Image (cartoon, helix red, strand yellow):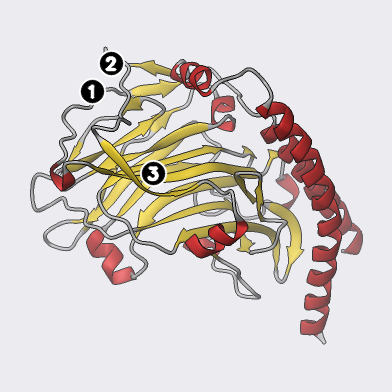
Amino acid sequence: MMRESSHHQTHLIHQNSLVAFSLLYLTLKIVIDATNSSTTTEQATMQALSNDFESETNCSWHNPISNETWRLIWSTEFKSEKKFQNEWIVEHEINQCNGNWVEQVHCNTNRSENIKIFDGFLMLAAMKERYFQNEFTAASITTRKFFSYGRYEIRASNPMGNFLRTSVFTRNPSESYWHENGQIDLFSFVQGTRIVRGVHFADSRNHYQSDDLSLSILNLETLHNFLTFGIEWNRQGLRFFAGSNYGPLIEFNNQSKYLKPFHQIRMQIGVGGIFFGEKNILNKIDWKCPSFLIDYVRIYEPFDGENHSLEEIPECQFRIIDPFRDHQLIDAICLEKRQKSTEDGLNHRQRA
């Protein structure tokens, strides 16, 4: 009876949410059409984004994408639901939820409440709702394909709210293989004062190590706008970038540092966990926007193969400063998800 009741509650939640998301889709369609008809161009967007960074060294603007340097070999633009399903694995947890292995307090689901495509954008959303034994739901997806050296680009807008964590990283799914081949944290944000980026690897004695290249955040609103970030990676090393600004080179020049392909890409939004230091968070939630929006994911390979030099990229360390917003879509989705989470919280308290 308990199992039937749980499934019945989940079914009712799903039915109610379909109506809300049908209305949301019509609203988003109007917003997107209006945005597409505006005079704002991609060139203006990139110019504005270049003002989001304060260089700590003399670093000239650098455009790494050119026909002579990189070749696009794979991309997800989130235009088709069928293409998305063919390219990504969507995690769906039933009854037993692992917290993304970092003690997070949600369940990952494949429901439209937590993951949905809107006219070229993918939404990964956290929800405050009763789901089996958990009080929250969220989303996690992984590429079906494995990737090697190259340039990885992700353009996304981060959520706003306490106890929310977004992460984009690469790794091999086998735990033993992961320890040997390492992990690249392209981007992780825990609503604090920095973006976490780094490389995890094993040394020649099979000891776990890491390099941390986090960024200081001067204005959190900046991360709520669409930002392009990623890595350029070859046999010799890798660099992180955001916009047109690059971090220092991590060199793999000895046996104590190595990071080998092949890796899958995983993108997540989660609730709570070891990064926040609190466990009883149910009545402390204050979410302005519990949605992680992804515009695209693109993978490039160098025209000259694995020997592509990273030395041509300028040494440039930077901090994020002023905000820039180029899509009303963020506000539309944030408003709906915030209202839905509030309603779920009220309903949950009334049932308790």
- Dot 2 crowding, Cα within 10 Å, few <14, some 14–19, many 20+: some
Residue 309 in percent (x, y) is at 15, 36
Which picture quadrant has residue 158? top right
Look at mark 1 in the image and give the residue it sits on.
314
Look at mark 3 in the image and give the residue it sits on.
186
Residue 292 in percent (x, y) is at 60, 44
Q: Is 215 or 312 nearer to us in this picture?
A: 312
Q: Residue furthest left?
A: 254
From what the image shows, is residue 45 above or below residue 345? above
Discs 1, 2 touching: Cβ within 8 Å = yes
Instruction: Kindly identify the amino acid type of the residue bearing the numbered disc 1.
Output: Pro
Q: Mark 1: which secondary structure? A: loop
Q: Residue furthest bottom?
A: 1
Instruction: Kindly identify the amino acid type of the residue bearing the numbered disc 3.
Output: Leu
Which picture quadrant has residue 106? bottom right
Q: Mark 2: which secondary structure? A: loop
* Mark carried by residue 59: 2
* Mark carried by residue 12: none
Q: Which of pointers 3 and 1 indicates the residue nearer the eye?
A: 1
Q: Mark 3: which secondary structure? A: strand
**Can residue 102 be seen by looking at this rendering?**
no
Of pointers 1 and 2, the one earlier in the residue sequence: 2
- Dot 3 crowding, Cα within 10 Å, few <14, some 14–19, many 20+: many
Q: Is 63 or 166 nearer to us in this picture?
A: 63
Residue at (16% x, 39% y) in the render: 308
Residue 253 in percent (x, y) is at 9, 44
Residue at (65% x, 75% y) in the render: 95
- Quadrant assignment for the C terminus: bottom right
Of pointers 2 and 3, the one earlier in the residue sequence: 2
